[in-house]
Image (cartoon, helix red, strand yellow):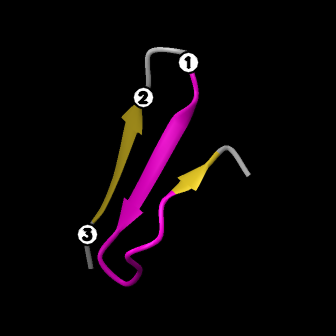
Amino acid sequence: PWQVMLKQADGSYVCVAESSSRFTLGE
């Protein structure tokens, strides 16, 4: 399974994983 972390303009990160369609915004 792949996992990608994207850094947003405000410095927070978004984690996108194949096993979940849910985005985690610094929670």
C-alpha gap between disc 1 and disc 3: 22 Å
Of mark 3 and mark 2, the one earlier in the sequence is: 3
The first of marks 1 and 3 along the sequence is 3
Above or below residue 6? Residue 19 is below
Residue at 44 percent across and 15 percent down: it is 9
- Secondary structure under tag 3 reads loop
Q: Amino acid at mark 2?
A: Lys
The residue labelled by disc 3 is 2
Q: Nearer the viewer, mark 1 or mark 3?
A: 1
- Depth check: 4 or 10 in front? 10
Of the two numbered discs 3 and 2 in the rendering, the one whose residue sits closer to the viewer: 2
- Using the image as rendered, state which of residue 10 and residue 4 is in the foreground: 10
Q: Residue at x 37, y 37 (%)?
A: 6
Whether tag 1 and tag 2 are in contact, CB under 8 A, the answer is yes
Q: Which residue is mark 1?
A: 11
Mark carried by residue 7 = 2
Q: Residues within 10 Å of mark 2 (few under 14, many from 20)?
A: few
Q: Tell me which secondary structure the magenta stretch mostly adopts.
A: loop
Residue 12 colored magenta?
yes
Q: Marks 3 and 2, how far apart in space?
A: 17 Å
Where disc 1 sits, the SS reads loop
Residue 2 horizontal/vertical position (percent): 25, 69
Q: Is residue 27 magenta?
A: no
Checking the image for residue 22, the label placed there is: none
Position in image of residue 10 (x %, y %): 55, 15
What segment carries the magenta color? Answer: 11-23
Look at label 3 and name its amino acid: Trp
The N terminus: image quadrant: bottom left
